[in-house]
Image (cartoon, rainbow, N blue to C red):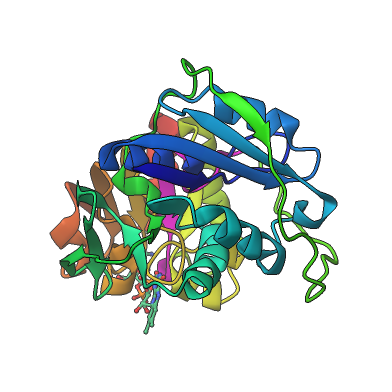
Amino acid sequence: MTILVIAEHTNAALAAATLNTVAAAQKIGGDIHVLVAGANAGAAADAAAKIAGVAKVLLADNAAYANQLPENVAPLVAELGKNYSHILAAATSNGKNILPRVAAALDVDQISEIISVESADTFKRPIYAGNAIATVQSSAAIKVITVRSTGFDAAAAEGGSASVEAVSGPADAGKSAFVGEELAKSDRPELTAAKIVVSGGRGMGNGDNFKHLYALADKLGAAVGASRAAVDAGFVPNDMQVGQTGKIVAPQLYIAVGISGAIQHLAGMKDSKVIVAINKDEEAPIFQVADYGLVADLFEAVPELEKSV
Ligand SMILES: Cc1cc2nc3c(=O)[nH]c(=O)nc-3n(C[C@H](O)[C@H](O)[C@H](O)COP(=O)(O)OP(=O)(O)OC[C@H]3O[C@@H](n4cnc5c(N)ncnc54)[C@H](O)[C@@H]3O)c2cc1C
């Protein structure tokens, strides 16, 4: 049994989600190979080779893979993947873009967003926005799986010494071209990797009021998130959205400010280790999942909290 893990990376560095995906592969058992498809991606491949438990790194270095266009990467993965028992990728935008195409090309069903491995063919995954957990057994010859990063503790980034082997395959499919990207720049930690997340909801009133959360977050070394209502109202950009249709986070500490606790929001944060809620409505459903609840006006509570940190 050999498992192919598709690395999530920026060519220069590996993304943290790759380590969680390798951890899921370790639970399945067998040899683990990591595919780094990119351009000038030697540094990412070297980093993948150092992950504990990785037996081999396949480096597909081609300008066509530079920006991870799924139209180009998926045929490569499908071609290489024929020799593997499992193909795993993180359930990130990239992974969710690439793997369904791979599954279709290999004519197998995809198993999405697993949160645990029961055996080599049986996995657990959330359904109904996380309100139920399904145990799924697959009889597919090649199991194509996306991995929810928060379900698996990261594999050690150091300690391995895998060989790096150059591979090639279908390159530019000619179906799409990379035009450009606008990346949000922030000194704060990335939302899905942060140990502490402070999130604001509609109760923040407007985008300017998020300054209270930024001040608190900066003192705590936290990332700032938001509910969909806050995003839809234009308070903050949508890459800050936490929830069913946003990002899934499971930090050590999640502070929900002016957020009612709709199930779609809870789906994105209820696995956080400690949940703190600040809401002026004592009936707000967020208090049902909160470990610590403060019934208070956020415009008094948050500045006070910030001063005391
Ligand atoms: C298909 C679908 C997908 C969705 N996906 C998501 C998702 O990914 N993420 C998500 O968040 N939502 C999602 N939603 C929307 C979700 O149903 C809720 O509408 C949304 O989460 C509500 O956001 P909120 O809690 O900020 O706003 P509200 O529900 O309006 O709550 C605001 C809260 O702020 C409190 N408040 C107001 N003023 C103050 C104050 N001064 N001090 C303290 N507290 C105050 C209020 O008491 C209230 O509890 C989705 C909905 C659908 C249908």
Q: Is residue 37 above or below residue 139?
A: above
The picture places residue 217, in percent across and down from the top left corner, at 49, 40
Answer left or right for 39 relative to 33.
right
Q: Quadrant of residue 137?
A: bottom left
Q: Which residue lies furthest to the front in this view?
A: 83
Q: Which of the pair 117/281 is nearer the observer? A: 117
Point out residue 189 in the picture as x, y percentages from the top left corner. 55, 38
Left or right: 173 in relation to 294: right
Whole-percent x, y for residue 101 in the image: 55, 71
Quadrant in the picture for the N terminus: top left
* Chain part drawn in magenta: 188-203
Judge by depth and name the residue closer to the eye, 227 or 147: 147
In the image: residue 230, left or right of residue 74: left
**Residue 277: horizontal and vertical position, in percent?**
27, 53
Residue at 53% x, 17% y: name it.
161
Kindly identify the residue that appears in the image at 73 percent across and 54 percent down.
183
Placement of the C terminus among the 4 image quadrants? top left
